[in-house]
Image: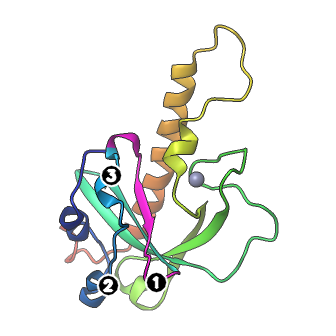
Amino acid sequence: MKQYTQQQILDAFHGATRSELKKVTFPLEFDDVDFSRLEYYGWRDRKMPRRAYIAMEHGDGLVALILNRADAKPSRRAMCAWCRDVELTEEAVMYTAKRGGAQGRRGDTLGTLVCSGFNCSKHARKLPPAYHKGTDLDAIRAEQLAGLRHRVSSFIAEVLSTEDQTAAD
Ligand SMILES: [Zn+2]
């Protein structure tokens, strides 16, 4: 990703009310975030424990969404649907986003299992624990990152797919 300011991210939210936007709290270490190593930026709101956010370059601009952590806990240790980190180094939890448009206003959400701390980009940069000499590690990593980008992008696309046509810019 390119480097973004908090204001640029706030301007990129879809489906958020004015009061929801006012309550968005960024991490204290926001200035240290290296966006160049992120496929998407996700963070938890330190004042609202169940509230989280993601921002990603999508289409021709940045898109940010509000996520809510669901009550339901996966019965077994679950794999993150985005980075698919098989080592399960980070707990994956269910987050939901409000669907765009009228569906979302009726309370319709879309859920996904995601690393609770949104470190997917870091996990996707990991190399396989065992590999043969001559394995193209750069290619493996590039493939993992492309997969991550694709899966987060698909989630965002689905959330936005029901947006009102008039509200789409
Ligand atoms: Zn993940």
Whether tag 3 and tag 2 are in contact, CB under 8 A, the answer is: no
Which comes sooner in the sequence, label 2 or label 1? Answer: 2
Q: Percent position (x, y) of residue 94?
A: 62, 71
Tell me the residue that label 1 is attached to. Answer: 48
Label 2 lies in ligand 1 vicinity (Cβ under 8 Å)? no
Image quadrant occupied by the N terminus: top left
Residue shown at 34% from the left, 46% from the top = 34
Whether tag 2 and tag 1 are in contact, CB under 8 A, the answer is: yes
Q: Magenta stretch: residue 41 in it?
A: yes
Tell me the residue that label 2 is attached to. Answer: 23
Q: Nearer the viewer, residue 58 or 101?
A: 58
| Residue mark closest to the camera, 3 vs 2 | 3
Q: CA–CA distance between discs 1 and 3?
A: 22 Å
Callout 1: SS:
loop
Left or right: 3 in relation to 147: left
- Classed neighbour count for the residue bearing mark 2: other residues with Cα under 10 Å, few (<14), some (14–19), many (≥20): few
- Image quadrant assignment for residue 115: bottom right
Residue shown at 81% from the left, 71% from the top = 75
The amino acid marked with disc number 2 is Lys
Magenta range is: 36-49
Dot label at residue 111: none
- Classed neighbour count for the residue bearing mark 1: other residues with Cα under 10 Å, few (<14), some (14–19), many (≥20): few
Q: CA–CA distance between discs 2 and 1?
A: 9 Å
Tell me the residue that label 3 is attached to. Answer: 32
Which comes sooner in the sequence, label 3 or label 2? Answer: 2
Placement of 30 over or under 125, stated as above or below: below
Q: CA–CA distance between discs 3 and 2?
A: 21 Å
Label 1 lies in ligand 1 vicinity (Cβ under 8 Å)? no
Q: Nearer the viewer, residue 169 or 69?
A: 69
The amino acid marked with disc number 3 is Asp
The amino acid marked with disc number 1 is Met
Placement of 101 over or under 156, stated as above or below: below
